Image (spheres, grey):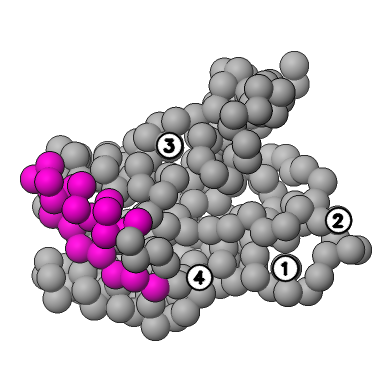
């Protein structure tokens, strides 16, 4: 029960890593405020957690809308009293297009969803952490843009690299307030973002990129997020925590 009695916001909670994190965090004792755009899928996750005896509420909205970040914090404090952590996980890859050919709207959408949303989250979550006496803010970044990249991923790489710079600044600005800021950098994970996982050739290629020769289960990334959100990482701040199955160091 590493997160016992902690109130935590999770965005992108209706699927993938966010959904897995909702279940893992709840099992670790957290009280959850779940956020995502898709109401039906989000409520399904909320109800599954409640059926297992967990505590969760859901707030439907888009992380690109600053008011959504504010509503998540308000819901956390109104329902559970205080906010202790945020796992800001919602993101998008966008279309894989070389930069000279990339439409501006694709660039702007990817930057807004992955990076500007993090600014909104920090703007509203950090004051709540201070009211609670401290807290932990975590963003899902990526090895893409940090240790490697792939053709067509200029917008995604730029946005995810920007998260690392953001957490470094947040860590220095708010460390004295007991607020920690970190980025979590997953490798390939078995989610919709990984593409067609029924295609053996595609999966084989993705597996080959990792030293462990496999993709992560979403729950494995969620457990790394538990570490960053919990008191187990009490002296960890301003970091890019790589949980990539050896993708960054694999050359074979």
Residue 84 is at least partly visible in this image: no
Q: Are marks 2 and 1 in contact (CB under 8 Å)?
A: no
Identify the secondary structure beneath mark 4: helix
Q: Position of residue 130 (x, y in %)?
A: 26, 71
Answer with mark 3 or mark 2, whichever residue precedes in sequence. Answer: 2
Task: Count every numbered label the image shows and give the total.
Answer: 4
Give the residue pinned by disc 4: 117
Residue named by callout 1: 106
What separation in Å lies between label 2 and label 1 (alpha carbons)? 11 Å
Q: CA distance from mark 4 to mark 3?
A: 22 Å
Residue at the spot of label 3: 218
Image coords of residue 156 (percent x, y): 68, 56
Query: Spatial distance from mark 4 to mark 1, Cα to Cα?
Result: 16 Å
Q: Which residues are magenta?
A: 41-61
Gap in angstroms between the C-alphas marked 3 and 2: 29 Å
> In the rendered structure, which disc, 2 or 1, sits on the residue that comes first in sequence?
2
Examine the rendering and report whether any part of residue 177 can be seen. yes
Q: Secondary structure at mark 1?
A: helix
Asked if the residue at tag 3 contacts the one at tag 4, i.e. Cβ–Cβ closer than 8 Å, the answer is: no
157 w.r.t. 250: above or below? below
Identify the mark at residue 216; answer none if there is no mark.
Answer: none
State the residue at coordinates (8%, 45%): 53
Residue at 70%, 53% in the rendered image: 157
Q: Are marks 2 and 4 in contact (CB under 8 Å)?
A: no
Which residue is located at x 34 percent, y 70 percent?
Answer: 60
Tell me: 184 left or right of 165. left
Mark toward the viewer: 4 or 3:
3
Q: Which residue is mark 2?
A: 98
């Amino acid at each position: 029960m590493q997160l016992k009695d902690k109130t935590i916001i999770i965005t992108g909670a209706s699927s993938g890593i966010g959904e897995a994190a909702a279940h893992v965090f709840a099992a670790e004792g957290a009280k959850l405020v779940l956020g995502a755009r898709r109401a039906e899928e989000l409520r399904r996750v909320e109800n599954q957690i409640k059926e297992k005896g967990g505590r969760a509420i859901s707030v439907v909205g888009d992380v690109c809308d600053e008011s959504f970040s504010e509503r998540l914090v308000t819901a956390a404090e109104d329902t559970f009293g205080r906010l202790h952590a945020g796992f800001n996980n919602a993101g998008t890859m966008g279309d894989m297009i070389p930069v000279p050919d990339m439409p501006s709207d694709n660039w702007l959408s990817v930057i807004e969803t992955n990076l500007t949303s993090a600014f909104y989250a920090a703007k509203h979550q950090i004051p709540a952490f201070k009211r609670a006496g401290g807290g932990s803010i975590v963003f899902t970044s990526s090895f893409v843009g940090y240790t490697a990249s792939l053709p067509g991923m200029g917008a995604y790489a730029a946005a995810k690299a920007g998260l690392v710079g953001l957490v470094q600044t947040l860590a220095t600005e708010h460390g004295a307030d007991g607020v920690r800021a970190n980025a979590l950098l997953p490798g390939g994970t078995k989610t919709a973002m990984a593409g067609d996982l029924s295609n053996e050739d595609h999966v084989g290629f993705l597996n080959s990129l990792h030293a462990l020769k496999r993709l992560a289960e979403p729950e494995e990334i969620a457990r790394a997020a538990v570490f960053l959100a919990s008191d187990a990482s009490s002296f960890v701040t301003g970091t890019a925590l790589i949980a990539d199955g050896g993708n960054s160091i694999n050359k074979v």
